[in-house]
């Protein structure tokens, strides 16, 4: 899980604060020491940690907290707000040129995930109604051109390339002319990467920048490299004055140091994050949602968006009707489980719910193989039973367990889960309840 270590430590500190009736200046100091440790262990830049702690302490030991009725919650609120600020505050949107094509130039070290991000971004923008063109400007590795072509083919987005015999500056210039003449409104230029920052590379990137004047230069960095990623961002920014950062491999980043430090160190916002190898594993970076996730307050909004993206709209409407008219059956439950499976690993999905931290996840021990049992259990019921499970008596439970090769306890568990999901789905289908859910976490 993203930020696993930091999340767990901060949540432990927050638990202590939450349960404290009164918070004294000494308590705040003590807590800040723990928060400081947690951030440093998460590989957050030392100076960033120092400033963060100073800001939170100043606000927390002020009267704002001590005179409050619920001082513990106030401290959590301050930490939450400052975490959001640390990661850039509001969502940083992409510039869109009023006279298309908008040109995005992608830069970064080799292996950071730049080419993958080009494909992901193109795919993402097309879903927003754009018509993107991918451009292969890495002429040093023939495999790089091929890689972009393969990606383009997968998502059916054209790739502009001139092989490896033309200069990248020339290719970039020609691609923009081509995009204009063919009515592409977005150009995504994949540039060459190196293993380390070198003068030659920077010079070439500066030349491309000068000749095509991109609307945005987006730097792709691997979040798993922690403070190295931050240093790379600083160097690229000094030379190219980048507009935003895309953090990749956040799915494997249990510490989160890069995500928490890049904005503060470079002054440039993180605009998107890569959260897996699939082309759909890509989303805008929402500092507020990330802060909530870190503090275990859940990320219900992302959850809902994910659900919306993978749930069939027509089916969702049918489902809503069923919930309203109390006709949600075990067959629907099974179908829902299968759709949830499409949303990605269940642990990732549950990690976004309020109060579910890595410890809870470990306790629950979600075993995706269990789905097979659930399926078998439901399929061993009669149609009538699936429509109305309250008619299942204990002898039928035994038969169902036998029929599905499971135990009565497992049958009971499925029935219980069904009731819980039914309750939860009801909440999701009611916008007012949803608003309440967003407020979970105490404020
Ligand atoms: P480039 O050299 O910067 O163009 O890097 P590539 O796009 O070739 O990516 C390098 C490797 O990182 C590939 O194996 C990608 O599948 C992988 N990768 C890229 N983004 C992500 C991500 O967000 N999560 C994970 N887990 N892997 C990623």
Image (cartoon, rainbow, N blue to C red):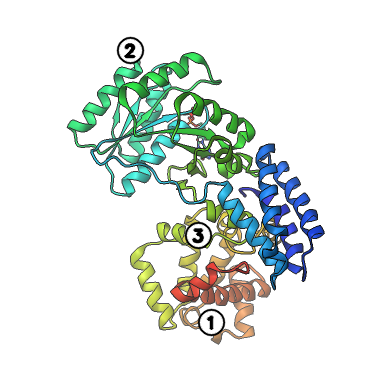
Secondary structure, mark 3, is helix
Secondary structure, mark 2, is loop
Query: How far apart are labels 2 and 3 at the CA level?
Result: 46 Å
Which numbered dot is residue 337? none
Q: Can you identify the residue that label 3 sits on?
A: 303
Q: Which quadrant of the view contains residue 171?
A: top left
Residue 243: in sight, yes or no?
yes
Residue 115 is situated, as x and y percent measured from the top left of the image, at: 43, 31
Residue 22 is situated, as x and y percent measured from the top left of the image, at: 77, 69
Q: Nearer the viewer, residue 349 or 67?
A: 67
Of tags 1 and 2, which is closer to the observer? 2
Left or right relative to 212: residue 206: right
Disc 2 residue crowd, few under 14, some 14–19, many 20+, Cα 10 Å: few
Q: Can you identify the residue that label 2 sits on?
A: 165
Q: Earlier in the sequence, mark 2 or mark 3?
A: 2
Left or right relative to 376: residue 359: right
Q: Earlier in the sequence, mark 1 or mark 3?
A: 3
Q: Which quadrant of the view contains residue 126?
A: top left
Q: Can you identify the residue that label 1 sits on?
A: 389
Query: How far apart are labels 1 and 3 at the CA level?
Result: 28 Å
Of tags 1 and 3, which is closer to the observer? 3
């Amino acid at each position: 899980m993203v930020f696993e270590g930091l999340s767990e430590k901060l949540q432990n500190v927050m638990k202590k604060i939450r349960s404290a009736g009164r918070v004294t200046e000494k308590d705040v100091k003590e807590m800040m020491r723990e928060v400081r440790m947690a951030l440093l262990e998460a590989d957050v830049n030392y100076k960033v940690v120092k400033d963060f702690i100073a800001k939170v302490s100043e606000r927390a030991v002020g009267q704002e907290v001590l005179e409050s009725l619920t001082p513990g919650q106030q401290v959590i609120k301050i930490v939450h707000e400052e975490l959001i600020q640390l990661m850039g505050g509001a969502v940083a949107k992409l510039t869109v040129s009023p006279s298309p094509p908008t040109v995005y130039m992608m830069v970064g070290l080799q292996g950071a995930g730049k080419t993958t991000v080009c494909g992901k971004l193109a795919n993402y923008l097309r879903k927003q109604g754009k018509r993107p063109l991918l451009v292969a400007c890495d002429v040093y590795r023939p495999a790089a051109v091929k890689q972009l072509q393969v990606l383009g083919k997968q998502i059916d987005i054209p790739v502009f390339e001139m092989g490896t015999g033309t200069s990248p500056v020339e290719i970039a210039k020609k691609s923009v002319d081509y995009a204009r003449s063919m009515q592409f409104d977005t150009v995504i230029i994949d540039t060459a990467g190196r293993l380390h920052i070198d003068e030659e590379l920077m010079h070439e990137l500066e030349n491309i920048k000068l000749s095509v004047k991109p609307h945005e230069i987006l730097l792709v960095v691997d979040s798993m490299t922690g403070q190295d990623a931050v240093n790379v961002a600083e160097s690229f920014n000094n030379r190219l004055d980048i507009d935003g950062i895309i953090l990749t491999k956040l799915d494997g980043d249990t510490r989160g140091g890069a995500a928490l430090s890049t904005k503060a160190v470079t002054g440039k916002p993180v605009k998107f994050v890569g959260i897996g190898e699939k082309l759909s594993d890509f989303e805008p970076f929402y500092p507020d949602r990330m802060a909530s996730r870190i503090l275990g307050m859940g990320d219900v909004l992302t959850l809902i968006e994910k659900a919306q993206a993978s749930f069939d709209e027509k089916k969702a409407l049918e489902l809503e009707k069923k919930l309203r008219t109390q006709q949600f059956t075990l067959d629907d439950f099974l179908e829902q489980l299968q759709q949830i499976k499409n949303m990605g690993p269940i642990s990732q999905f549950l990690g976004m719910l309020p109060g579910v931290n890595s410890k809870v996840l470990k306790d629950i021990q979600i075993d995706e193989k269990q789905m097979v049992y659930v399926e078998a259990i439901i399929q061993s019921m009669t149609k009538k039973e699936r429509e109305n499970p309250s008619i299942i008596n204990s002898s039928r439970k035994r038969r169902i367990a036998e029929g599905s090769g499971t135990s009565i306890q497992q049958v009971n568990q499925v029935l219980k889960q069904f009731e819980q999901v039914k309750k939860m789905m009801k909440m999701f289908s009611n916008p007012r309840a949803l608003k309440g859910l967003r407020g979970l976490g105490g404020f």
